[in-house]
Amino acid sequence: MIHLPRFMLAAPSSGSGKTMITCGILQALKNRGLNPASFKCGPDYIDPMFHSKVIGAKSRNLDTFFADERTVRYLFARTASQGRRTSQKETYDMRGKQVPSQGGFLTPGISVFEGVMGIYDGLGGTSAKASSYDLAAVTDTPVILVVNARGMSLSVIPLIHGYVDYQKQLGKEVIRGVILNQTTKMTCMLLKEQIEAQTGICVYGYVPQLADCVVESRHLGLVTPDEIRDLRQRIERLGAELEQCLDMEGILTLADSAADYQDRELRMPEAAAKFCGVFGAGGPEAGAAAGTWRPEAEGCSQNEAGAAVGAPRPEPEECFQNEKNTSSVPRVRIAVAMDEAFCFYYQDNLDLLELMGAEIVPFSPLHDKKLPDRTDGLLLGGGYPELYAKALSENTAMKAQIRDRIEEGMPYLAECGGFMYLHETMEDMEGNAYPMCGCIEGEAYRTPKLSRFGYITLEVAEGGKTSLASGQKKAAEGGKTSLATEQKEAVEGGKTSLATEQKEVAEDGKTLSAPEQKETACEHNAGKKTGDTAGDANRSGLFFAERQTIPIPAISANSAMHLLLAEGQTIRAHEFHYFDSTNPGSSCTAKKPTGSRQWSCIHGTDRSMAGYPHLYYWSNPEFAYRFLEKVREQKNL
């Protein structure tokens, strides 16, 4: 059994103060000499950046849409346990008491989860699936409800009671306490006894109005931590304040009451392990090698079991050690864009690439003049390139090298902002267009509202379409036709453009094109606190002009190249952007998890994938493995 103290801060709605209070509590725990781990529910990129600034380590995302329950529990346990290894015979618990070190490997820590939107807000706005509640239930994490009690007194009790009572309809009762935000010590003292008596949960204190600790927002959510000059001072003031107004001892006791995990839950799920060399060297074919643990005896399903019968059960201290240095595949260097413009990454995605043999090498498209030495593959994540469009455009040396390497066949992945950067031109927030890498014909332009929003599942488009838009260089010897020429010929030949195709199928009720998506604001997103867009209507006449979608010729199923995403497979993803493209791609179909909405997207080849969706590799580990295999193939390894 593994003891992993933890709790979640959730709320009735966005704007309740979860992020601020989460950062404050993390700082208060640090002030006590603890080393907390932090997690964000859902696909948010920015809140984990704030967590990371406080704890000095990467915060992680946990999401019950992106991954199955076993994988979610494993990813939590993996991070909650790592960093607390020790060679000492004695270690200390959360209150400084000396305790056994569990074999000299894992020592007790504490994990803090931050919820998303309202605690029950999940898929489609009509389900609790993928909500904060769902994550708490899946991970057996007790919840403290953060309630904005500004302007309220006794009325806060029926509000709390309703949230506590509603969980009974869903199954597990996870709400164990409440924090009253934006209220006074006097109000909290007056209401504490009644709240506890009438709702059955504990009041863990209050948080007064702290105007100097508020973090500004913009179009994709909060500004990033590096843009706040005095962030460190704000967080330290907040941590000191919360130490005084919250019952930190009570919160620690709640965290300590969380259910233990089975040792087997620290073992990587087979779906990923067989591609990581964890159960044997040499790739997926070796995933069933002798020595794999078969845990049916401990209650696992057949799908969770390994392949070797009778192998010894791993001890806790072996579980994560077995994830490293067990694969014989050659390592490759993946250049990952990481700077002010490109900063949206799921840390668990990068970890998975490393476990599969990648060396992650950060670089800056803004500030560096060339790619890192010995770059074998490229990863361009999302972020805010539109805020740095001029500077990105002026770094011509970097743009030229990226374009040349892609045209030479270097494997790459590009998501959202990284996808925009590969276009011929990209607009900034004022509608000024700047030249970019030119790997993808067309322009990335701003729209007056969210273009596509929420969770999606990607699958290979019907007919095996393969996009040739992503830097496919005209081959002199082979006489291959460039994308621009193919598109021109397609138009002259009377072929139906993508825009027309989408319109036609939309009328049949099958597919909606990107501009026709009527996304709701009921699904949680990568930056849930949207900024003020009051000026959009006034600016719309200036640069929110209608764009002509570039036609992309379809490749027949017989001649289509294989994609990184294998036919018949899916990968889960998320979209959240105020920009669109005249050339969004057509290699994949994006489908919403609820309803019938779907659309074409992604420029895909056998060695690249570029589009607006943010991918979650743990939903299909084979996708990440196929990418790295193409990198090794290109490197002749």
Image (spheres, rainbow, N blue to C red):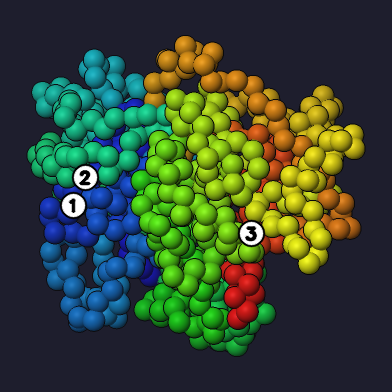
Q: Position of residue 443 (x, y in %)?
A: 60, 36
Q: Position of residue 579 (x, y in %)?
A: 54, 32
Q: Is there a contact, CB below 8 Å, between mark 3 and mark 2?
A: no
**Quarter assignment of residue 411:** bottom right
Mark 1: give few (<14), some (14-19) or many (20+) Cα within 10 Å: many
First-in-chain label (3 vs 2): 2
- Residue type indicated by callout 2: Ile
Q: CA distance from mark 2 to mark 1?
A: 6 Å
Quadrant of the rendering where the N terminus is positioned: bottom left
In the image, what residue occupies the spot 33% across and 47% down? 49
Badge 1 element: helix
Dot 2 corresponds to which residue?
Answer: 25
In the image, what residue occupies the spot 46% across and 32% down? 428
In the image, what residue occupies the spot 54% across and 65% down? 377
Dot 1 corresponds to which residue?
Answer: 29
Q: Is there a contact, CB below 8 Å, between mark 2 and mark 1?
A: yes
Badge 2 element: helix
Dot 3 corresponds to which residue?
Answer: 407
First-in-chain label (3 vs 1): 1
Q: CA distance from mark 3 to mark 1?
A: 50 Å
- Residue type indicated by callout 3: Glu
Is residue 455 or residue 488 the one in the foreground?
488
Q: Is residue 291 left or right of residue 336?
A: right
Q: Position of residue 6 (x, y in %)?
A: 31, 53
**Quarter assignment of residue 30:** bottom left
- Residue type indicated by callout 1: Leu
